[in-house]
Image (cartoon, rainbow, N blue to C red):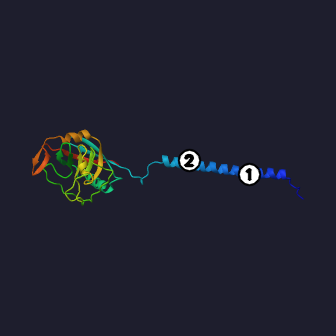
Amino acid sequence: MPEKITKREQRIIEKQKKMQKIKKIVICAVIICIVVSISVYAYITKPETKTEKHNRTAIIETSMGTIKIKLYEDKVPITTANFIKYANDGFYNGTIFHRVIDNFMIQGGGFYPNLTQKTPTYPPINLEINSELIHVDGAVAMARTSDPNSATSQFYICDGAQPSLDGNYAVFAQVIEGMDVVRNIASVQTHTENGMNDVPVDDVIIISVTISE
């Protein structure tokens, strides 16, 4: 027959049980902290996956030098995809900057050196405006007619900020290297030819446009 437990012994036993419970709680809390810390570290240091949007760059080789632009694929996916298709097809190769205005912009991507217009190979795209993308110095945007949804292959690069164009034309990229080339092209001598104004006297040729991967 078990011996009767005294009140003092009972208090000791209860105290031991409480201590065991506290110990278990502390151990669980430590384990949870370790798991959370490992998860947070893994998330912060994880490599970029294919599902994360990567903004590519484009290299525009011209007869007056190289211009490198960053494409805002995450902000204007339709417009950048259109430009990338034309670039990858080699459409821009051998075309010219046919409209050049100092302290305004240089426009190209649609005419041959003899000022014959090159026929676009894709349908016009809808005007895609992102309020975060404005016409700062070196901004690259789509040229179009009076119809907002008429842009095809032609684009322009701002020579200086042009806030009056914001909200009316789709900015889709930014010059990150070669602004000196943009300035030089913008300052060339121009004239009127075949009924077109601001045509460079000496052809400024787009040799190629290459998209980085």
| Quadrant assignment, res 151 | bottom left
Q: Residues within 10 Å of mark 1 (few under 14, many from 20)?
A: few
Q: Which mark is residue 18?
A: 1
Position of the N terminus, as image quadrant, is bottom right
Judge from the rendering whether residue 123 lies leftward or rightward of residue 16; answer left or right: left
Q: What residue lies at 75% left-to-right and 52% top-to-bottom? A: 17
Q: Tag 1: residue type?
A: Lys
Q: CA distance from mark 2 to mark 1?
A: 29 Å
Helix, strand or loop under label 1 = helix
- In the rendered image, residue 139, in percent from the top left (x then y), is placed at 27, 47
Judge from the rendering whether residue 11 lies leftward or rightward of residue 172; answer left or right: right
Q: Tag 2: residue type?
A: Ser
Q: What residue lies at 49% left-to-right and 47% top-to-bottom? A: 44
Residue receiving disc 2: 37
Q: What residue lies at 31% left-to-right and 57% top-to-bottom? A: 78
Q: Residues within 10 Å of mark 2 (few under 14, many from 20)?
A: few
Q: Closer to us: mark 2 or mark 1?
A: 1
Judge from the rendering whether residue 43 lies leftward or rightward of residue 200; answer left or right: right
Depth check, front residue: 130 or 28: 130
